[in-house]
Image: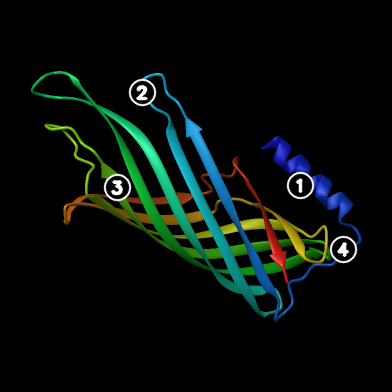
């Protein structure tokens, strides 16, 4: 976190002569790409996560933008379970592919011409399918499983404008609510609901947006 904050402060210092572009009629373009891999000693293969999320918005008035993001996600997780009949380990790989639609609204409040605070209200609907070549007599069968995930969040952030068309953002998690339902072969398998407040204040997110 310390490095991210120091980088953000440095950007503030070098953006003294730029002008923010959050006027009515402007277009906001951005998004992010993420990739991670992890290998645990207890698992035969690495865990892999990949996601891409382009976003676009339109300023319907000064400092108020309405838009949406479209996200694609892929993950691969090794699984290991004990066969209750043979008492031997069943090893296989669980894969998932999902897509999410996330409409949002964001309002900017100017601190200086180059630095603005913003609050973003966002909803998200995510649909994921799971696949796995599951051995016989597996306790939890992840094949043909589906997940529907719905969430809403209100998050604060800061945007620095080092140039007229580029904004560098530092955002935090605020209020969020989520509801996730799992179905297996068409029937409800489990459901998780979660409400959080400031759960990631010590894990800020750094991003970039283009203002056209």
Which residue is under mark 4? 18
Secondary structure, mark 4, is loop
Secondary structure, mark 1, is helix
Q: Which mark is drawn over residue 8?
A: 1
Percent from the top left, x then y, of residue 169? 69, 55
- Specify the quadrant that holds the C terminus: bottom right
Mark 2 vs mark 4, foreground winner is 2
Secondary structure, mark 3, is strand
Which residue is under mark 2? 44
How busy is the neighbourhood of tag 3: few (under 14 within 10 Å), some, or many (20 plus)? some
In this view, which residue lies farthest toward the right? Answer: 17
Question: How far, Cα to Cα, is label 3 from label 4?
Answer: 47 Å
Q: Residue at x 34, y 42 (%)?
A: 95
- Against 66, is 80 above or below? above
Percent from the top left, x then y, of residue 207? 66, 52
Q: Residue at x 54, y 48 (%)?
A: 198
Question: How far, Cα to Cα, is label 2 from label 4?
Answer: 52 Å
Question: How far, Cα to Cα, is label 2 from label 3?
Answer: 20 Å
Are circles 2 and 3 on residues that touch, CB within 8 Å? no
Q: Earlier in the sequence, mark 3 or mark 4?
A: 4
Q: Earlier in the sequence, mark 2 or mark 1?
A: 1
Which residue is under mark 3? 130
Q: Earlier in the sequence, mark 1 or mark 4?
A: 1
């Amino acid at each position: 976190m310390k490095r991210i904050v120091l980088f953000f402060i440095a950007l503030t210092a070098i953006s003294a002569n730029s002008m923010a572009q959050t006027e009515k009629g402007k277009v906001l373009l951005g998004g992010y790409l993420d990739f991670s891999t992890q290998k645990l000693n207890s698992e035969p293969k690495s865990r892999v996560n990949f996601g891409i999320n382009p976003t676009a918005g339109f300023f319907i008035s000064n400092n108020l933008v309405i838009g949406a993001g479209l996200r694609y996600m892929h993950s691969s997780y090794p699984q290991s379970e004990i066969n209750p009949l043979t008492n031997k380990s069943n090893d296989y790989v669980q894969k998932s592919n999902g897509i999410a639609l996330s409409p949002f609204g964001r309002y900017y409040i100017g601190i200086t011409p180059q630095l603005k605070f913003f609050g973003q209200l966002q909803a998200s609907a995510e649909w994921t399918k799971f696949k796995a070549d599951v051995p016989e007599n597996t306790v939890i069968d992840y094949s043909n499983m589906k997940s529907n995930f719905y969430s809403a969040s209100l998050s604060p952030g800061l945007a620095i404008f080092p140039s007229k068309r580029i904004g560098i953002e530092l955002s935090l998690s605020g209020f969020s609510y989520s509801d996730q339902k799992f179905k297996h072969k068409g029937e409800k398998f489990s459901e998780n609901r979660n409400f959080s407040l400031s759960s990631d204040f010590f894990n800020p997110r750094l991003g970039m947006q283009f203002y056209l």
